[in-house]
Image (spheres, rainbow, N blue to C red):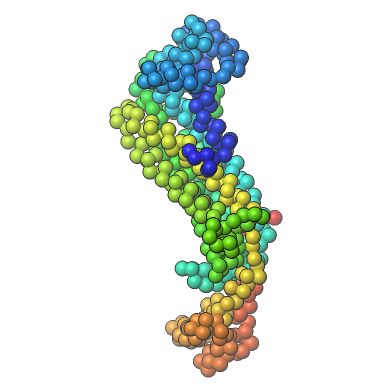
Amino acid sequence: MIPRYSRPQMTALWEPEARFKIWFEIEAHATEKLGELGVVPPSAAKALWDWWATNPAIDVDAIDAIEAVTKHDVIAFLTWVAEQVGDEARFMHQGMTSSDVLDTCLAVQLTRAADILIEDLDRLLDVIKRRAFEHKLTPTIGRSHGIHAEPVTFGLKMAEAYAEFSRCRTRLIAARAEVATCAISGAVGTFANIDPRVEEHVAEQLGLAIEPVSTQVIPRDRHAMFFATLGVIASSIERLAVEVRHLQRTEVLEAEEYFSPGQKGSSAMPHKRNPVLTENLTGLARMVRAYALPAMENVALWHERDISHSSVERYIGPDATITLDFALGRLTGVIDKLLVYPERMMKNLDKMGGLVHSQRVLLALTQAGVSREDSYRYVQRNAMKVWESDGQLSLMELLKADADVTAALSPDQIEEKFNLDYHFRQVDTIFERVFGKA
């Protein structure tokens, strides 16, 4: 985790003190149920909760000092708690194993992280929707292979992003549900030394589902799906960021990141206004995606458990969620303040002498009785003249002067095929599909 790309709410979730507090809650809830079942004295849980009610500070340094001797983090934590609580603490961890604490804690952290990320997506979706309706009918050129294709609107570009991030939100909700499981099943997951009702109680208290078969660890296919979902969200972030980067190119300049007063674009060239935020988002997306692969490699553990996954998750749990949280926040800011230039969009759309209307003429010729092959040939030979003139010639005028074309279409019919509004007839339909009825 790098502070430069971190935000406080998500970072706090992964701090050692936060982790130890979750560990305590797991242990205390388990002891509470064990007391109800008569396995340990009810006074044991009371002692734990009474101590907790005093809002003690977790002494991370003291726990670390114990771990330096024990070489075991959970034992170090239990030892420290016992020193604070006293004799009743000996009933903690009855029939449990370390994975019961570690895996359940990770489930809590990932579900809480997912909740933050869902809120991030909601804010991003709100901003994208606002910009979509703002530019619902702002004409711009659609590009395929980076080349002018046919007209679209900038609002449609935003609607496309909205639909994509809506899918991201749906996937994240599903991934959250999949990873939100609790395992309190003891060594090798057989419940030999702990009643399954303890697991049910802890799960209920922490807002988790029970893990049907934990084997001692929660199966890592759940985590693989979670981190893969984060990777997909990162890819969607990059896709929108790359669109902004292309639109900000000097030769295009249809939109650009907000450039604040006093901001500098280059240490050498004072004129520069670079798309640094969206370039940064492309880099951050690469990192989040990179965390998905080790999560998938964690699935294949030895027999009922090993700890090859442990060091991996200590990295990817905080780093993936913190980085994605930051990236979503940054993208929201970019789209919120994005500078959009409709006049430049129209200038670029008109740049190539009407070539963007070629398909309409092609279709009109076929409907007038000309074969598709001949129709394509008639339009293309004129379009290539416009292309080679760098848009200085007019496709409409060339078509009007082409005897093969005018044998099938009148000048008025040709001109009608160059009506820009024709391309936007279904914008309302698309918006209704994306955003629902007004």
Q: Nearer the viewer, residue 394 or 14?
A: 14
**Residue 32, position as x, y percentages in the image:** 52, 14
**Residue 160, position as x, y percentages in the image:** 56, 58
Q: Is residue 308 visible to us here?
A: yes
Using residue 274 as the reference point, say whether residue 126 is left or right of it: right
Give the total of numbered labels: 0
> Is 316 placed above or below 25 here?
below
Q: Residue at x 67, y 58 (%)?
A: 133
Extreme residue in the left direction: 302
Extreme residue in the right direction: 438
Q: Residue at x 38, y 27 (%)?
A: 217
Q: Quadrant location of residue 408?
A: bottom right
Image quarter where the C terminus lies is: bottom right
Q: Residue at x 60, y 90 (%)?
A: 410
**Residue 427, position as x, y percentages in the image:** 63, 64
Extreme residue in the bottom direction: 403
> Is 15 placed above or below 127 here?
above
Q: Nearer the viewer, residue 285 or 431?
A: 285
Q: Residue at x 39, y 35 (%)?
A: 312
Q: Nearer the viewer, residue 26 or 182?
A: 26
Q: Is residue 202 visible to us here?
A: no
**Residue 168, position as x, y percentages in the image:** 52, 48
Using residue 126 as the reference point, say whether residue 284 is left or right of it: left
